[in-house]
Image (tube, rainbow, N blue to C red):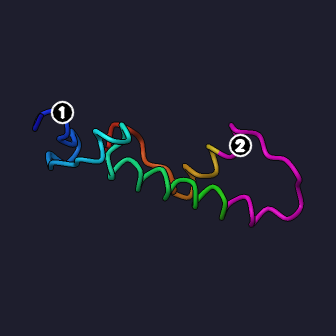
Amino acid sequence: MKASCTDPKTGKIDASILTTGVSSTDRKKRTEIGRAIIKLLESKHKTAAVSKQKLLMEMKAQSLLVNKEKN
């Protein structure tokens, strides 16, 4: 039971993994990335659409996205 609800990134017990399948650390990171995407898109008043690739490059350039190797 303890092993199944331990967050592998933090090593702490996180019971929400059992109920949602996602640790609170991962949920927080997803929320931060979502807010960063919204903020970046809101700053683009001139275009109605942005490609995923361009959005990803801009987020990396602004250090809004961290590589998985660093986590």
Q: Residue 54, which numbered label? A: 2
In terms of secondary structure, where does tag 2 sit? helix
Name the residue furthest front.
19
Distance Cα–Cα, label 1 vs label 2: 38 Å
Residue 1's x, y, as percent?
A: 12, 34
The magenta region covers: 40-55
- Above or below, 52 relative to 33: above
Drawn side of residue 19 relative to residue 4, left or right: right
Residue 18's x, y, as percent?
A: 28, 38
Between 63 and 24, the residue placed more toward the observer is: 24
**Residue at the image position 50 percent from the left and 56 percent from the top:** 31
Between 9 and 4, the residue placed more toward the observer is: 4
Amino acid type indicated by mark 2: Lys
- Above or below, 7 relative to 3: below
**Residue at the image position 57 percent from the left and 53 percent from the top:** 61
**Residue at the image position 85 percent from the left and 47 percent from the top:** 49
Residue 43's x, y, as percent?
A: 75, 66
**Residue at the image position 68 percent from the left and 37 percent from the top:** 53
Residue 58's x, y, as percent?
A: 64, 51
